[in-house]
């Protein structure tokens, strides 16, 4: 029975869905047909996370079910899955180390204020958020959270503290096992980004994936009548998984191209961005030292 040898551990709205689909194209890479298995979240039983998981997410709780996701692996060199919740859950880090201690771990990070804003609009797009972004931020910072809120809607701000989240993984794994990439690099040069990622996974970096589709775009629909057709739902995921891989990939690509044209995210209010950046400043500066990268753009 096969276990993965790499994991995309985070973060939501930092390019994980696009990278997942680009990796699926490589003949030497196998990624689980189910994105966001969250197996190690269920395994870790973190009381701060588990009660607030969306009920419609795939449920992969047993090791046997998890291994079954990889039963079609043959001669693939890199075998993995993508569950962006892992990075936010230190208990998941412990479980990953227990089951696959030599796994390669991939973290994708985005300007934390922009990531929070994009995450908010994704939930608006899917009909899962009715508050304004300002109200959602205020309630989170004040600790006034309704128990009915799903996990991501409780932590728009908190999950942007990347340095804090990375420490659990740096304490559990050798630094050589952890590759940290920036959304800005993926956006600027997706093919170059994937070439570097293929090298990290030790597969043929000469393979050129189709990176023309930007997956999981967020924002309100330009026409409200289109809203029901833009939601990401359990039904559409189930239908796509039932299709043969080439057709499933084609369907996903067409859906994402159409969605990106039908959505228009308004700019973040400057005053609110300044407030978020002020709260992130210390963590960004710490992360800048950890990565040895200039992150001053995130502080503007």
Image (spheres, grey):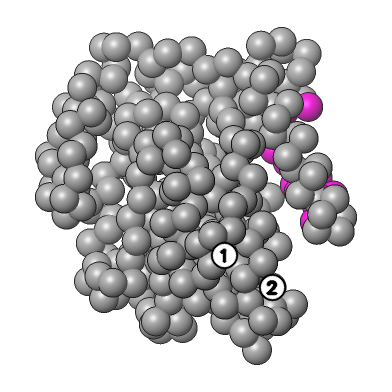
**Residue located beneath label 1 in the image:** 81
* Closer to us: 234 or 20: 20
Residue placed at 16% from the left, 54% from the top?
290
Residue 211 in the figure: left or right of residue 45: right
Q: Residue 228: percent from the left, percent from the top?
A: 77, 25
Badge 1 marks a residue whose secondary structure is strand
Location of residue 270 with respect to 251 vertically, above or below:
above
**Residue located beneath label 2 in the image:** 69
Specify few, some or many for label 1: CA neighbours under 10 Å numbering under 14, 14-19, or 20 or more: many
* Closer to us: 171 or 110: 110
Let me know if residue 49 appears in the view: no
**In this picture, which residue range is highlighted in magenta?**
229-241
Mark 1 touches mark 2? (CB < 8 Å): yes
Q: Tell me how far mark 1 sits from mark 2, CA to CA.
A: 9 Å
Q: Which residue lies furthest to the bottom in this view?
A: 1
* Closer to us: 57 or 36: 36
């Amino acid at each position: 029975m096969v276990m993965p040898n790499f994991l995309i551990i985070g973060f939501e709205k930092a390019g994980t869905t696009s990278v997942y689909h680009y990796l699926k194209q490589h003949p030497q890479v196998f990624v689980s047909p189910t994105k966001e298995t969250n197996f190690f979240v269920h395994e870790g039983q973190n009381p701060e996370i588990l009660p607030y998981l969306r009920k419609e997410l795939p449920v992969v709780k047993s090791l046997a079910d998890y291994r079954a996701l990889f039963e079609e692996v043959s001669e693939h060199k890199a075998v993995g899955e993508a569950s962006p919740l892992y990075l936010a859950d230190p208990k998941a880090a412990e479980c990953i180390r227990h089951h696959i201690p030599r796994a390669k771990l991939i973290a994708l990070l985005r300007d934390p204020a922009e990531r929070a804003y994009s995450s908010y609009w994704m939930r608006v797009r899917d009909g899962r958020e009715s508050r304004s972004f300002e109200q959602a931020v205020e309630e989170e910072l004040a600790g006034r959270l309704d128990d009915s809120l799903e996990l991501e809607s409780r932590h728009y701000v908190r999950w942007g503290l990347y340095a804090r989240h990375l420490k659990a993984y740096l304490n559990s794994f050798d630094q050589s096992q952890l590759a940290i990439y920036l959304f800005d690099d993926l956006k600027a040069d997706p093919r170059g980004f994937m070439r570097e990622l293929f090298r990290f996974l030790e597969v043929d970096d000469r393979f050129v994936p189709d990176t023309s589709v930007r997956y999981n775009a967020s924002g309100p629909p330009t026409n409200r009548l289109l809203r029901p057709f833009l939601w990401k739902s359990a039904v559409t995921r189930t239908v796509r998984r039932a299709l043969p891989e080439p057709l499933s990939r084609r369907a996903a690509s067409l859906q994402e191209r159409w969605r990106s044209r039908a959505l228009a995210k308004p700019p973040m209010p400057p005053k609110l961005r300044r407030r978020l950046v002020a709260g992130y400043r210390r963590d960004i500066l710490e992360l800048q030292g950890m990565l040895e990268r200039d992150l001053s753009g995130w502080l503007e």
